[in-house]
Amino acid sequence: MNGTLTALASALPLAAGWSVHTLRLRRRIEAARRDPLTGLLTREAFTERAERALAAGPSAVYLIDLDRFKQVNDTHGHAAGDAVLRATGQRLAKWADINAGTVVRLGGDEFAAVARVYSRADLVWGLEELTRSLQEPVEFEGHALTVGASIGAVAYDPRTDEADVSTLLRVADEHMYAAKRGQAPWLNALVLEPTSATVNGRRAGRPGAAGLGGAR
């Protein structure tokens, strides 16, 4: 009996050490799946969750591009731009929590999201709430920085539709760009098929499409 107790006692520190190691490893893995500036998911982690969300029920995919972000950087510096990106990430995360969604920073001042929707009215309500949130000024060193955003969205119902996350992001991207050109806060797609070809993984005609950058 004493031998058993001694063995157990000696094993406890080893077990505790493995528990701490496992916890640290999980934290490192989770950190690698997060954008260091905004805390939002990376593209790979987002794609995994978005696929599950789309398969679970009626949803919408959103592509968000900030307006006047370059002006903020040029006028107030990159620290101000970082403040805007962090605030945008926080607002998108809060919106996603309310709408049973998940959000990613694609890069620069572009973001994407997938969230549950049950009707066109539900989609429009979500877009209007998101627009209002992103139009709120960001306070930075005594300045009120206002950017706003252009948003493209596409609804998806797994019971009747067939499309993957990449295709839906392309459709949302096309409508975001159309909204930006038309100076509208948002546009939602009525069909799931992209209308523009892609070059190097980016929509033809989109800035960067002719370059050597990787796909978004």
Image (cartoon, helix red, strand yellow):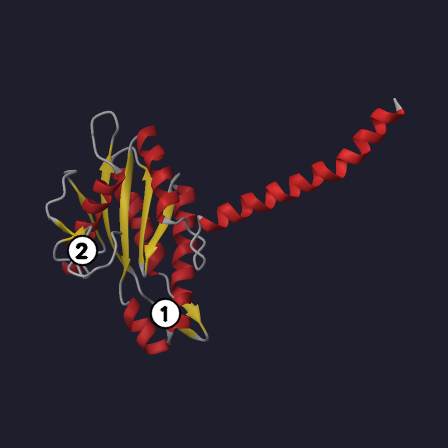
The amino acid type, in three-letter code, at marker 2 is Tyr
Q: Which residue is mark 1?
A: 145
Q: Is residue 77 above or below residue 146?
A: below
Q: CA distance from mark 2 to mark 1?
A: 23 Å
Asked if labels 1 and 2 touch by Cβ distance under 8 angstroms, the answer is no
Dot 2: what SS?
A: helix
Q: Residue 99: percent from the left, percent from the top?
A: 38, 41
Crowd rating for badge 2 (residues with CA inside 10 Å; few <14, some 14–19, many 20+): many
Crowd rating for badge 1 (residues with CA inside 10 Å; few <14, some 14–19, many 20+): many
Tell me the residue at 33%/51% (across/down).
130
Residue 72 or residue 78, whichever sits in front: 78
Tell me the residue at 25%/54% (across/down).
214
Q: Residue 12: percent from the left, percent from the top?
A: 76, 35
Q: Which mark is residue 171?
A: none
The amino acid type, in three-letter code, at marker 1 is Leu
Q: Residue 72: percent from the left, percent from the top?
A: 33, 72
Residue 124 or residue 2, whichever sits in front: 2
Most extreme residue toward the right is: 2
Dot 1: what SS?
A: strand
Q: Quadrant of the N terminus?
A: top right
Q: Which residue is mark 2?
A: 177
Q: Residue 38: percent from the left, percent from the top?
A: 43, 57
Q: Quadrant of residue 97?
A: top left
Tell me the residue at 36%/55% (across/down).
133
Tell me the residue at 18%/55% (across/down).
177
